Image (tube, rainbow, N blue to C red):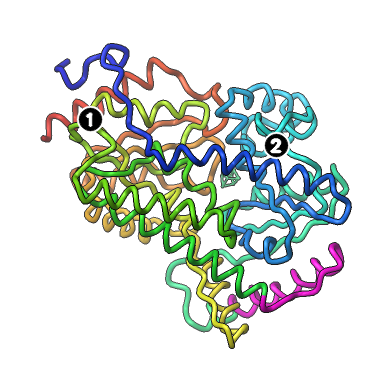
Amino acid sequence: MNSAQESPQVKKKLVKTLKTSQKLKKIMAWYFIKGKLYSKLPWKQVAWSVSGFPTEFLWAYNVYPFLPENCATIAAARHKSQELIEYAEACGYCRDLCSYFKTNIGAYDSKLPAQFGGLEKPDLMTCTNTVCDTHVKWFQTQSRNLNVPLFVWDIPAYVSGSDEKTMNRYLDYVTDQFWEFTDFMYDHTGKKFNQKKFIKTVKKADELAVLWRELFKYRKQIPAPLGYADTLGDVFPMFALPGKNRGIKFYRELVEEVKEAAKVGKGVVEDEKYRLLFEGIPFWYKIKFFHQLANFGAVVTYEPYTWSFGVRREIFDDDIDRSLREMAKSLIHTPYWYNLETRVEYFKKVIEEYKIDGVILHNNLSCRPSTTGMADLKQIIQEELGIPVLLLTCDMNDPRAFSEAPMQTRLESFIELLESRA
Ligand code: SF4
Protein backbone atom coordinates (compact mmCIF):
# COMPACT_ATOMS: atom_id res chain seq x y z
CA MET A 1 0.00 0.00 0.00
CA ASN A 2 1.50 3.36 -0.96
CA SER A 3 1.24 6.67 0.85
CA ALA A 4 -1.95 7.73 -0.94
CA GLN A 5 -3.67 4.65 0.43
CA GLU A 6 -2.63 4.77 4.06
CA SER A 7 -5.34 4.03 6.56
CA PRO A 8 -7.96 6.79 6.67
CA GLN A 9 -7.77 6.65 10.46
CA VAL A 10 -4.12 7.79 10.22
CA LYS A 11 -4.56 10.64 7.76
CA LYS A 12 -8.09 11.73 8.71
CA LYS A 13 -8.57 13.97 5.69
CA LEU A 14 -12.11 14.95 4.84
CA VAL A 15 -13.77 16.51 1.83
CA LYS A 16 -14.35 20.09 2.95
CA THR A 17 -17.86 21.43 3.36
CA LEU A 18 -18.57 24.85 1.91
CA LYS A 19 -19.39 27.76 4.20
CA THR A 20 -22.72 28.33 2.49
CA SER A 21 -23.71 24.65 2.83
CA GLN A 22 -23.45 25.03 6.58
CA LYS A 23 -26.35 27.52 6.45
CA LEU A 24 -28.62 24.69 5.34
CA LYS A 25 -29.15 23.55 8.94
CA LYS A 26 -30.90 26.85 9.71
CA ILE A 27 -33.05 26.62 6.59
CA MET A 28 -34.11 23.08 7.43
CA ALA A 29 -34.88 24.02 11.03
CA TRP A 30 -37.05 26.90 9.77
CA TYR A 31 -38.82 24.58 7.31
CA PHE A 32 -39.64 21.91 9.91
CA ILE A 33 -40.71 24.35 12.64
CA LYS A 34 -42.97 26.24 10.25
CA GLY A 35 -44.39 22.97 8.93
CA LYS A 36 -45.20 21.79 12.44
CA LEU A 37 -46.97 25.09 13.09
CA TYR A 38 -48.99 24.70 9.87
CA SER A 39 -50.03 21.22 10.90
CA LYS A 40 -51.43 22.57 14.20
CA LEU A 41 -53.39 25.49 12.73
CA PRO A 42 -56.86 24.41 11.61
CA TRP A 43 -56.98 26.93 8.73
CA LYS A 44 -53.66 25.76 7.23
CA GLN A 45 -53.02 22.56 5.29
CA VAL A 46 -50.09 20.20 5.21
CA ALA A 47 -49.44 17.56 2.54
CA TRP A 48 -47.15 14.59 2.18
CA SER A 49 -45.61 14.25 -1.25
CA VAL A 50 -42.94 12.29 -3.09
CA SER A 51 -39.88 13.10 -5.17
CA GLY A 52 -40.95 13.47 -8.77
CA PHE A 53 -44.17 15.28 -7.83
CA PRO A 54 -43.84 19.04 -8.56
CA THR A 55 -43.88 20.33 -4.99
CA GLU A 56 -44.21 23.90 -6.29
CA PHE A 57 -47.80 23.03 -7.27
CA LEU A 58 -48.55 22.57 -3.56
CA TRP A 59 -46.77 25.78 -2.62
CA ALA A 60 -48.90 27.55 -5.25
CA TYR A 61 -51.89 26.60 -3.07
CA ASN A 62 -50.04 27.56 0.11
CA VAL A 63 -50.22 23.93 1.17
CA TYR A 64 -47.12 22.97 3.15
CA PRO A 65 -45.32 20.00 1.60
CA PHE A 66 -43.53 17.34 3.62
CA LEU A 67 -41.44 14.69 1.94
CA PRO A 68 -41.45 11.39 3.86
CA GLU A 69 -38.42 10.27 1.84
CA ASN A 70 -36.48 13.28 3.06
CA CYS A 71 -37.60 12.60 6.64
CA ALA A 72 -36.43 9.00 6.21
CA THR A 73 -32.95 10.22 5.24
CA ILE A 74 -32.84 12.34 8.41
CA ALA A 75 -33.78 9.28 10.48
CA ALA A 76 -30.91 7.37 8.85
CA ALA A 77 -28.41 10.19 9.36
CA ARG A 78 -29.45 10.31 13.05
CA HIS A 79 -28.99 6.52 13.27
CA LYS A 80 -32.67 5.83 13.88
CA SER A 81 -33.63 4.14 10.63
CA GLN A 82 -32.72 0.56 11.58
CA GLU A 83 -35.08 0.39 14.54
CA LEU A 84 -37.88 1.97 12.48
CA ILE A 85 -37.34 -0.48 9.62
CA GLU A 86 -37.33 -3.40 12.04
CA TYR A 87 -40.58 -2.11 13.54
CA ALA A 88 -42.18 -2.05 10.06
CA GLU A 89 -40.90 -5.57 9.36
CA ALA A 90 -42.42 -6.72 12.64
CA CYS A 91 -45.72 -5.29 11.34
CA GLY A 92 -45.45 -7.60 8.32
CA TYR A 93 -43.69 -5.49 5.67
CA CYS A 94 -41.02 -7.68 4.15
CA ARG A 95 -37.28 -7.08 4.04
CA ASP A 96 -37.27 -6.60 0.26
CA LEU A 97 -39.48 -3.50 0.37
CA CYS A 98 -38.03 -0.01 0.04
CA SER A 99 -36.39 1.06 3.30
CA TYR A 100 -37.65 4.65 2.92
CA PHE A 101 -41.19 3.29 3.04
CA LYS A 102 -40.48 1.16 6.11
CA THR A 103 -38.69 4.03 7.84
CA ASN A 104 -41.79 6.17 7.26
CA ILE A 105 -44.09 3.49 8.72
CA GLY A 106 -41.91 3.26 11.83
CA ALA A 107 -41.36 7.02 12.16
CA TYR A 108 -45.05 7.88 11.95
CA ASP A 109 -46.28 5.10 14.25
CA SER A 110 -43.67 5.87 16.90
CA LYS A 111 -44.38 9.62 16.76
CA LEU A 112 -40.70 10.35 16.25
CA PRO A 113 -39.77 14.07 16.63
CA ALA A 114 -38.97 15.95 13.41
CA GLN A 115 -35.27 16.30 14.23
CA PHE A 116 -35.00 12.50 14.06
CA GLY A 117 -37.09 12.13 10.91
CA GLY A 118 -40.63 12.12 12.30
CA LEU A 119 -43.54 13.90 10.63
CA GLU A 120 -47.04 15.06 11.40
CA LYS A 121 -50.30 13.69 10.03
CA PRO A 122 -51.06 15.48 6.75
CA ASP A 123 -54.38 16.88 5.52
CA LEU A 124 -53.82 15.33 2.10
CA MET A 125 -51.28 13.35 0.10
CA THR A 126 -50.06 13.76 -3.48
CA CYS A 127 -47.97 11.26 -5.31
CA THR A 128 -46.86 10.08 -8.72
CA ASN A 129 -45.30 7.00 -10.24
CA THR A 130 -42.91 9.00 -12.39
CA VAL A 131 -39.92 7.83 -10.34
CA CYS A 132 -41.17 4.47 -9.07
CA ASP A 133 -44.28 2.39 -8.46
CA THR A 134 -43.28 2.01 -4.79
CA HIS A 135 -44.35 5.63 -4.24
CA VAL A 136 -47.91 4.76 -5.24
CA LYS A 137 -48.22 1.60 -3.13
CA TRP A 138 -46.55 3.40 -0.18
CA PHE A 139 -48.94 6.35 -0.31
CA GLN A 140 -51.98 4.15 -0.87
CA THR A 141 -51.01 2.22 2.26
CA GLN A 142 -50.46 5.33 4.35
CA SER A 143 -53.53 7.14 3.06
CA ARG A 144 -55.60 4.14 4.19
CA ASN A 145 -53.75 3.87 7.53
CA LEU A 146 -54.16 7.58 8.26
CA ASN A 147 -57.51 8.04 6.53
CA VAL A 148 -56.21 10.94 4.43
CA PRO A 149 -57.24 11.77 0.82
CA LEU A 150 -54.70 10.87 -1.86
CA PHE A 151 -54.14 12.23 -5.36
CA VAL A 152 -52.09 10.00 -7.68
CA TRP A 153 -50.67 11.51 -10.85
CA ASP A 154 -50.24 8.63 -13.26
CA ILE A 155 -47.31 9.17 -15.63
CA PRO A 156 -46.77 6.76 -18.52
CA ALA A 157 -43.40 5.04 -18.56
CA TYR A 158 -41.26 6.71 -21.19
CA VAL A 159 -39.48 4.19 -23.33
CA SER A 160 -36.65 5.73 -25.31
CA GLY A 161 -37.70 5.85 -28.92
CA SER A 162 -41.45 6.38 -28.35
CA ASP A 163 -42.86 7.90 -31.54
CA GLU A 164 -44.34 11.39 -31.75
CA LYS A 165 -47.95 10.21 -31.93
CA THR A 166 -47.56 8.11 -28.79
CA MET A 167 -45.78 10.96 -27.03
CA ASN A 168 -48.61 13.37 -27.89
CA ARG A 169 -51.12 10.97 -26.40
CA TYR A 170 -48.98 10.77 -23.26
CA LEU A 171 -48.87 14.57 -23.04
CA ASP A 172 -52.66 14.82 -23.34
CA TYR A 173 -53.07 12.18 -20.66
CA VAL A 174 -50.68 13.91 -18.24
CA THR A 175 -52.04 17.44 -18.77
CA ASP A 176 -55.64 16.26 -18.32
CA GLN A 177 -54.66 15.05 -14.89
CA PHE A 178 -53.42 18.51 -13.98
CA TRP A 179 -57.03 19.68 -14.03
CA GLU A 180 -58.03 16.68 -11.93
CA PHE A 181 -55.37 17.82 -9.46
CA THR A 182 -56.95 21.30 -9.27
CA ASP A 183 -60.36 19.66 -8.59
CA PHE A 184 -58.79 17.51 -5.88
CA MET A 185 -57.23 20.58 -4.26
CA TYR A 186 -60.53 22.45 -4.37
CA ASP A 187 -62.38 19.51 -2.82
CA HIS A 188 -59.91 19.12 0.05
CA THR A 189 -58.72 22.68 0.71
CA GLY A 190 -61.58 24.79 -0.59
CA LYS A 191 -59.06 26.78 -2.65
CA LYS A 192 -59.64 27.53 -6.31
CA PHE A 193 -56.87 27.37 -8.89
CA ASN A 194 -55.17 30.77 -9.03
CA GLN A 195 -53.40 30.96 -12.39
CA LYS A 196 -51.42 34.08 -11.55
CA LYS A 197 -50.06 32.64 -8.33
CA PHE A 198 -49.40 29.31 -10.01
CA ILE A 199 -47.33 30.89 -12.79
CA LYS A 200 -45.38 33.02 -10.33
CA THR A 201 -44.55 29.98 -8.16
CA VAL A 202 -43.54 27.76 -11.07
CA LYS A 203 -41.31 30.52 -12.43
CA LYS A 204 -39.50 30.74 -9.12
CA ALA A 205 -39.13 26.95 -9.04
CA ASP A 206 -37.59 27.10 -12.49
CA GLU A 207 -35.18 29.80 -11.32
CA LEU A 208 -34.12 27.46 -8.51
CA ALA A 209 -33.47 24.66 -11.03
CA VAL A 210 -31.39 27.00 -13.20
CA LEU A 211 -29.21 27.88 -10.19
CA TRP A 212 -28.87 24.21 -9.25
CA ARG A 213 -27.71 23.35 -12.74
CA GLU A 214 -25.29 26.26 -12.73
CA LEU A 215 -23.48 24.71 -9.76
CA PHE A 216 -22.76 21.62 -11.83
CA LYS A 217 -21.05 23.73 -14.47
CA TYR A 218 -18.25 24.54 -12.00
CA ARG A 219 -17.88 20.90 -10.97
CA LYS A 220 -16.37 20.22 -14.39
CA GLN A 221 -13.33 22.19 -13.37
CA ILE A 222 -10.12 20.62 -11.98
CA PRO A 223 -9.92 20.74 -8.99
CA ALA A 224 -13.64 20.44 -8.28
CA PRO A 225 -14.89 23.30 -6.08
CA LEU A 226 -17.95 21.25 -5.04
CA GLY A 227 -18.44 17.54 -4.31
CA TYR A 228 -21.17 15.07 -3.38
CA ALA A 229 -20.37 15.55 0.32
CA ASP A 230 -22.03 18.98 -0.11
CA THR A 231 -24.61 18.38 -2.82
CA LEU A 232 -26.28 15.44 -1.06
CA GLY A 233 -27.49 17.99 1.51
CA ASP A 234 -27.58 21.09 -0.68
CA VAL A 235 -30.19 19.48 -2.93
CA PHE A 236 -32.80 19.88 -0.13
CA PRO A 237 -34.41 23.13 -1.47
CA MET A 238 -34.88 21.48 -4.88
CA PHE A 239 -37.52 19.11 -3.55
CA ALA A 240 -38.80 20.95 -0.46
CA LEU A 241 -38.67 24.63 -1.41
CA PRO A 242 -39.24 25.02 -5.15
CA GLY A 243 -41.07 28.29 -5.69
CA LYS A 244 -39.84 29.83 -2.41
CA ASN A 245 -37.46 32.79 -2.14
CA ARG A 246 -35.51 31.15 0.67
CA GLY A 247 -34.21 28.41 -1.60
CA ILE A 248 -33.27 30.90 -4.32
CA LYS A 249 -31.33 33.08 -1.88
CA PHE A 250 -29.44 30.03 -0.57
CA TYR A 251 -28.50 28.83 -4.07
CA ARG A 252 -27.41 32.29 -5.18
CA GLU A 253 -24.96 32.38 -2.28
CA LEU A 254 -23.82 28.86 -3.04
CA VAL A 255 -23.20 29.67 -6.69
CA GLU A 256 -21.18 32.73 -5.68
CA GLU A 257 -19.00 30.71 -3.29
CA VAL A 258 -18.44 27.92 -5.82
CA LYS A 259 -17.76 30.39 -8.64
CA GLU A 260 -15.16 32.17 -6.51
CA ALA A 261 -13.47 28.89 -5.52
CA ALA A 262 -13.39 27.84 -9.19
CA LYS A 263 -11.85 31.18 -10.15
CA VAL A 264 -8.94 30.77 -7.74
CA GLY A 265 -8.58 27.02 -8.38
CA LYS A 266 -9.63 25.95 -4.88
CA GLY A 267 -10.90 22.37 -4.69
CA VAL A 268 -12.88 20.69 -1.92
CA VAL A 269 -10.11 18.11 -1.72
CA GLU A 270 -6.47 19.02 -1.21
CA ASP A 271 -4.32 17.65 -4.05
CA GLU A 272 -7.26 16.24 -6.03
CA LYS A 273 -6.14 13.02 -7.74
CA TYR A 274 -9.26 11.10 -8.70
CA ARG A 275 -12.56 12.40 -9.97
CA LEU A 276 -15.46 10.02 -9.41
CA LEU A 277 -19.01 9.57 -10.58
CA PHE A 278 -21.40 8.06 -8.01
CA GLU A 279 -24.59 6.52 -9.34
CA GLY A 280 -27.42 5.95 -6.91
CA ILE A 281 -28.77 7.20 -3.63
CA PRO A 282 -26.10 7.70 -0.94
CA PHE A 283 -25.96 5.61 2.25
CA TRP A 284 -27.57 8.17 4.52
CA TYR A 285 -26.41 6.45 7.71
CA LYS A 286 -22.79 6.58 6.45
CA ILE A 287 -22.41 10.00 4.86
CA LYS A 288 -18.84 10.02 6.17
CA PHE A 289 -18.00 7.71 3.28
CA PHE A 290 -18.18 10.67 0.88
CA HIS A 291 -16.10 12.91 3.13
CA GLN A 292 -13.45 10.24 3.70
CA LEU A 293 -12.77 9.88 0.00
CA ALA A 294 -10.42 12.80 0.61
CA ASN A 295 -8.03 10.32 2.24
CA PHE A 296 -7.33 9.05 -1.25
CA GLY A 297 -7.40 12.45 -2.96
CA ALA A 298 -10.76 11.45 -4.45
CA VAL A 299 -13.92 13.49 -4.88
CA VAL A 300 -17.31 12.75 -6.43
CA THR A 301 -17.69 15.42 -9.09
CA TYR A 302 -20.92 14.18 -10.66
CA GLU A 303 -23.90 12.18 -9.47
CA PRO A 304 -27.03 11.66 -11.58
CA TYR A 305 -29.13 11.43 -8.39
CA THR A 306 -28.90 15.07 -7.32
CA TRP A 307 -28.69 16.37 -10.91
CA SER A 308 -32.06 14.76 -11.66
CA PHE A 309 -33.78 16.99 -9.08
CA GLY A 310 -32.89 20.07 -11.14
CA VAL A 311 -35.90 19.71 -13.40
CA ARG A 312 -36.57 22.74 -15.59
CA ARG A 313 -40.25 23.64 -16.05
CA GLU A 314 -40.67 26.45 -18.50
CA ILE A 315 -43.82 28.47 -18.11
CA PHE A 316 -45.40 31.00 -20.46
CA ASP A 317 -47.42 33.86 -18.95
CA ASP A 318 -50.05 33.93 -21.63
CA ASP A 319 -50.32 30.26 -22.54
CA ILE A 320 -51.26 27.89 -19.73
CA ASP A 321 -51.91 24.96 -22.09
CA ARG A 322 -48.45 25.18 -23.63
CA SER A 323 -46.96 25.55 -20.14
CA LEU A 324 -48.74 22.42 -18.96
CA ARG A 325 -47.45 20.44 -21.93
CA GLU A 326 -43.90 21.50 -21.10
CA MET A 327 -44.52 20.47 -17.51
CA ALA A 328 -45.88 17.12 -18.71
CA LYS A 329 -42.71 16.52 -20.74
CA SER A 330 -40.58 17.12 -17.66
CA LEU A 331 -42.65 14.58 -15.72
CA ILE A 332 -42.36 11.97 -18.44
CA HIS A 333 -38.62 12.30 -19.05
CA THR A 334 -37.35 10.87 -15.78
CA PRO A 335 -33.83 9.39 -15.93
CA TYR A 336 -34.98 6.29 -14.00
CA TRP A 337 -36.99 5.25 -17.05
CA TYR A 338 -34.05 5.41 -19.44
CA ASN A 339 -33.35 2.13 -21.17
CA LEU A 340 -29.81 0.77 -21.04
CA GLU A 341 -28.82 2.30 -24.36
CA THR A 342 -29.90 5.82 -23.33
CA ARG A 343 -28.34 5.41 -19.91
CA VAL A 344 -25.00 4.37 -21.43
CA GLU A 345 -25.03 7.43 -23.73
CA TYR A 346 -25.83 9.64 -20.74
CA PHE A 347 -22.94 8.15 -18.76
CA LYS A 348 -20.49 8.47 -21.64
CA LYS A 349 -21.37 12.13 -22.01
CA VAL A 350 -20.97 13.07 -18.35
CA ILE A 351 -17.84 10.93 -17.90
CA GLU A 352 -16.22 13.02 -20.61
CA GLU A 353 -17.61 16.39 -19.50
CA TYR A 354 -16.72 15.96 -15.83
CA LYS A 355 -13.36 14.29 -16.61
CA ILE A 356 -14.23 11.21 -14.57
CA ASP A 357 -11.49 8.71 -13.62
CA GLY A 358 -13.66 6.09 -11.93
CA VAL A 359 -17.29 5.19 -11.32
CA ILE A 360 -18.97 3.90 -8.16
CA LEU A 361 -22.35 2.25 -8.69
CA HIS A 362 -24.62 1.76 -5.69
CA ASN A 363 -26.50 -1.46 -6.25
CA ASN A 364 -29.23 -0.42 -3.84
CA LEU A 365 -31.19 -3.35 -2.40
CA SER A 366 -34.16 -1.06 -1.72
CA CYS A 367 -34.53 0.53 -5.10
CA ARG A 368 -35.27 -1.38 -8.29
CA PRO A 369 -35.58 1.68 -10.57
CA SER A 370 -32.13 3.01 -9.76
CA THR A 371 -30.35 -0.35 -9.80
CA THR A 372 -31.87 -2.24 -12.69
CA GLY A 373 -29.23 -2.79 -15.35
CA MET A 374 -26.28 -1.82 -13.16
CA ALA A 375 -24.27 -4.96 -13.87
CA ASP A 376 -24.60 -4.27 -17.61
CA LEU A 377 -23.73 -0.63 -17.08
CA LYS A 378 -20.58 -1.66 -15.19
CA GLN A 379 -19.48 -4.00 -17.94
CA ILE A 380 -20.08 -1.48 -20.73
CA ILE A 381 -18.29 1.39 -18.95
CA GLN A 382 -15.30 -0.83 -18.23
CA GLU A 383 -15.10 -2.35 -21.69
CA GLU A 384 -15.93 0.63 -23.88
CA LEU A 385 -14.37 3.44 -21.84
CA GLY A 386 -11.69 1.50 -19.98
CA ILE A 387 -12.69 3.18 -16.73
CA PRO A 388 -12.62 1.26 -13.40
CA VAL A 389 -16.04 0.68 -11.88
CA LEU A 390 -16.80 -0.30 -8.29
CA LEU A 391 -20.19 -1.94 -7.78
CA LEU A 392 -21.28 -1.75 -4.13
CA THR A 393 -24.30 -3.70 -2.94
CA CYS A 394 -25.82 -1.83 0.03
CA ASP A 395 -28.99 -0.01 0.96
CA MET A 396 -29.58 3.72 1.25
CA ASN A 397 -31.41 3.61 4.61
CA ASP A 398 -30.87 0.17 6.09
CA PRO A 399 -27.48 -0.06 7.83
CA ARG A 400 -27.83 -3.84 8.08
CA ALA A 401 -26.74 -3.97 4.44
CA PHE A 402 -23.48 -2.10 5.01
CA SER A 403 -20.36 -3.86 6.29
CA GLU A 404 -17.63 -1.45 7.18
CA ALA A 405 -14.51 -3.60 6.79
CA PRO A 406 -15.31 -5.26 3.41
CA MET A 407 -16.48 -1.89 2.11
CA GLN A 408 -13.17 -0.28 3.05
CA THR A 409 -11.19 -3.11 1.47
CA ARG A 410 -13.12 -2.87 -1.77
CA LEU A 411 -12.72 0.89 -1.87
CA GLU A 412 -8.97 0.61 -1.32
CA SER A 413 -8.66 -1.96 -4.14
CA PHE A 414 -10.63 0.36 -6.42
CA ILE A 415 -8.30 3.26 -5.57
CA GLU A 416 -5.28 1.01 -6.28
CA LEU A 417 -6.76 0.32 -9.67
CA LEU A 418 -7.15 4.06 -10.32
CA GLU A 419 -3.58 4.59 -9.12
CA SER A 420 -2.27 1.96 -11.52
CA ARG A 421 -3.83 3.84 -14.43
CA ALA A 422 -2.46 7.25 -13.42
S1 SF4 B 1 -35.63 4.50 -2.99
FE1 SF4 B 1 -36.28 3.76 -4.99
S2 SF4 B 1 -38.02 2.39 -4.56
FE2 SF4 B 1 -37.70 3.66 -2.73
S3 SF4 B 1 -39.05 5.40 -3.01
FE3 SF4 B 1 -37.06 6.03 -3.82
S4 SF4 B 1 -37.15 5.54 -6.01
FE4 SF4 B 1 -38.83 4.44 -5.03
Image position of 271 (left or right of 282):
left
C-alpha separation, residue under disc 2 versus residue under disc 1:
36 Å
- Mark 2 and mark 1 lie on one chain; the one further toward the N terminus is 2
Q: Is residue 164 above or below residue 84?
A: below
Three-letter amino acid code at the position of disc 2: Asn
Q: Describe the element under mark 2 as helix, strand or loop.
A: helix
Dots 2, 1 in contact, CB < 8 A: no
Part of the protein shown in magenta: 170-196
Farthest residue in the top direction? 10
Q: Position of residue 285 (x, y in %)?
A: 52, 27
359 or 192, nearer to the observer: 192
Tell me the residue that label 1 is attached to: 297
Q: Relative to the observer, which residue lies in front, 252 or 64?
A: 252
Q: Is residue 300 left or right of residue 100?
A: left
Q: Position of residue 321 (x, y in %)?
A: 62, 84
Q: Residue 145 lies in what quarter of the image?
A: top right
- Tell me which residue sits at (54%, 71%) in the image: 203
User: Where residue 366 sits in the image (x, y, percent)?
Assistant: 56, 37
Residue 70's spot in the image, x, y percent? 60, 42
- Image quadrant where one finds the N terminus: top left
| Residue for badge 2 | 104
Residue 127 sits inside the magenta stretch? no
Under mark 1, the amino acid is Gly
Q: Which of pointers 2 and 1 indicates the residue nearer the eye?
A: 1
With respect to residue 130, does 286 lie above or below?
Answer: above
